Image (cartoon, rainbow, N blue to C red):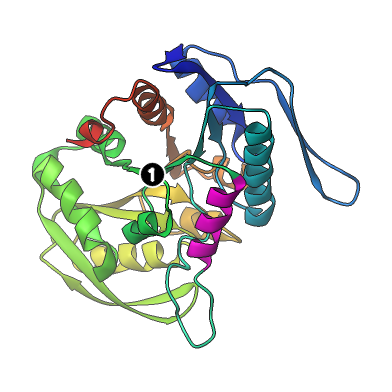
Amino acid sequence: MSAKNGAIKLVAGNSNPALAREIAAWLGMDLTKASVRRFADGEVFVEVQENVRGADIYIIQSTSAPANDHLMELLIITDALRRASARRITAVVPYFGYARQDRKAGSRSPISAKLVANLITHAGADRVMTLDLHAAQIQGFFDIPVDNLFASPVMVRDIKERFDLSNVMVVSPDVGGVVRARGLAKRINAPLAIIDKRRERAGESEVMNVIGDVAGYTCVLIDDIVDSGGTLVNAADALLANGAKEVYAYITHGVLSGGAAARIAGSKLKELVITDSIQPTDAVNKTANIRLLSIAGLIGEAISRTAAEESVSSLFD
C-alpha cells in the first residue's frame, strides 16, 4: 500500500502488538521490522531494521500500563524514525495515557496531558491519531494535527446486532459523559438516562440518583474509560434498583487496574464490552462477562484515509 507521496510503513511498540498485527492485516501489509527492547538497567533501546527514508510512518503504541515505559518507547521510536529520515511520522495512540490529568485539579498540581503532548511533538511526530480522548480539549495541547477518532460506529454496529432497540435505554454513568451518551443514543434512536453520583475520593464513587425512568428497559451504560470499575458496578446496582431489566456497559478503554476484573465478574452487570485499544490482561480475558470489540478496522481505515489525504471525519458522519 502506498501513500499519496510515498510508501506507508507501520511500526509497533510493545504496548499492544496484537492490535498492531490486526491493523497491518486489515491494511494488507506487514509490520516494519524493528527491535524495541530493554538494556539490563531498564533503558529502552530501539533499532529500526528496514529502510524508512522518505516513508509515511505510523507508530502504533498505546500509552497504557506500564504507562511510563510505553510512553518512553513511543518517544524513542519517534526519534529513531526522525533520524532515519522518515518523511512523515504519525503517532497512533489508541489509548492516550495521562489524559485524565488535563487541568489543574488542585494547587501546585501538573497538567500532565499537556506535558505528554509536548514530549510527543518535540520527539518528532508530525501528527497524532488517537481514540475517544478523555477530554476533547487535549487536541488543543498539541501544535500538530490531531485526529480524535470515535469508537461509537463500532459500538453502534454491535448494539444493533445484539439488542431489540425498541427496549434499549442509553445511560451516562455521570453528568460529564452526557454528550458522549447522547450522541450514541441519537445514532440508535434510544432514550437517555443519567446517573447523578458523588465521588468521595479517587477510584471510588457513590451513586446518588437516577435521572430518567429506566423501569423495564435494557440499560446500556456508555463511557470512555473503565478503571477500577466501581462507577459501573454502582451504576448497575442503581439502575436495577430503579426497575431496569438488565444492565450492559460499552466502554472504549478497558484500563481495569488492580482488582477491577474480579469486581466486574462479581457485579450485576450482564456484560462489559470494551475495545482492544488496550491489550487485555489475563484476568480480563478470563472474566466471563467481559467481551472485546476490535478497533483494527476503524484505525486501519483512518490510516488509509490519512495516507491518501482523504477525509477522516467522514468516517463518523
Q: Residue at x 38, y 62 (%)?
A: 232
Q: Is residue 17 left or right of residue 271?
A: right
Res 84 visible: yes
State the count of labels. Answer: 1
Circle 1 — which element?
A: loop
Magenta stretch, overall SS = helix
Q: Nearer the viewer, residue 98 or 291?
A: 98
Q: Determine if the magenta segment contains residue 222.
A: no
Q: Nearer the viewer, residue 67 or 75?
A: 75
Where residue 76 appears, x then y in whole percent? 69, 43
Q: Is residue 204 left or right of residue 192?
A: right
Instruction: State the image quarter where residue 54 is shown.
Output: top right
Above or below: residue 164 compared with residue 256: above
Where residue 182 appears, x then y in whole percent? 16, 54
Above or below: residue 235 compared with residue 162: below
Badge 1 density bin: few <14, some 14–19, many ≥20, Cα 10 Å: some
Where residue 100 appears, x then y in whole percent? 45, 65
Q: Is residue 188 left or right of residue 221?
A: left
Q: Residue at x 25, y 61 (%)?
A: 172
User: What residue is shown with label 1?
Assistant: 145
Q: Residue furthest bottom?
A: 107
Above or below: residue 9 compared with residue 12: above
Over which residues does the magenta segment extend? Answer: 112-123
Q: Nearer the viewer, residue 249 or 251?
A: 251
